[in-house]
Image: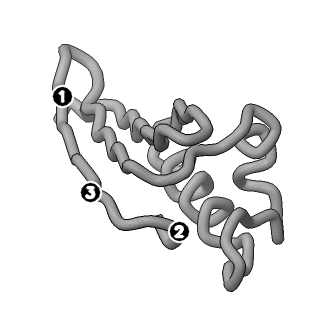
Amino acid sequence: MDEKPGKITIRVVKNDHHIIISFTDEGIGMTPEQIKKLGEPFFTTKQKGTGLGMLTTFKIIENHDGNIEIESEVGKGTTIHVILPIQSE
């Protein structure tokens, strides 16, 4: 949210098989084309970004058998859902 001030809301939900951690911001949002490119090396929406943060994040979540879902609307912000399996012992 470099472009304008706002808040970030974090929500955690647990069901029988997964834990879902959702991060919602009040930033400028992203287009569907930008969302599709997230995680590609060196793609960034930030002026001073490297384009490696989301790539690394996707790989870490994937290595834990999870996934990431992204919802965004230009002018209204973005929600990122990190979905991780609950491991039985």
Q: For the point 48% across and 42% down, which residue is it?
A: 78
Residue holding disc 2:
3
Q: Residue 31: x percent and y percent?
A: 72, 38
Q: Are marks 2 and 1 in contact (CB under 8 Å)?
A: no
64 or 34: nearer the eye?
34
Residue holding disc 1:
13
Badge count: 3
Q: Residues within 10 Å of mark 1 (few under 14, many from 20)?
A: few
Q: Residue 1: x percent and y percent?
A: 46, 64
- Where is residue 75, by image quadrant? top right
Q: Secondary structure at mark 2?
A: loop
Mark 2 or 1: in front is 2
Residue holding disc 3:
7
Q: Secondary structure at mark 1?
A: strand
- Work out how far the residue at label 2 is from the one at label 3, CA to CA, in angstroms: 13 Å
Q: Residue 2: x percent and y percent?
A: 50, 72
Say left or right for 46 vs 42: left
Q: Secondary structure at mark 3?
A: loop
In primary-sequence order, the first of circles 2 and 1 is 2
Say left or right for 37 vs 5: right
Q: Amino acid at mark 3?
A: Lys
Image quarter hosting the C terminus: top left
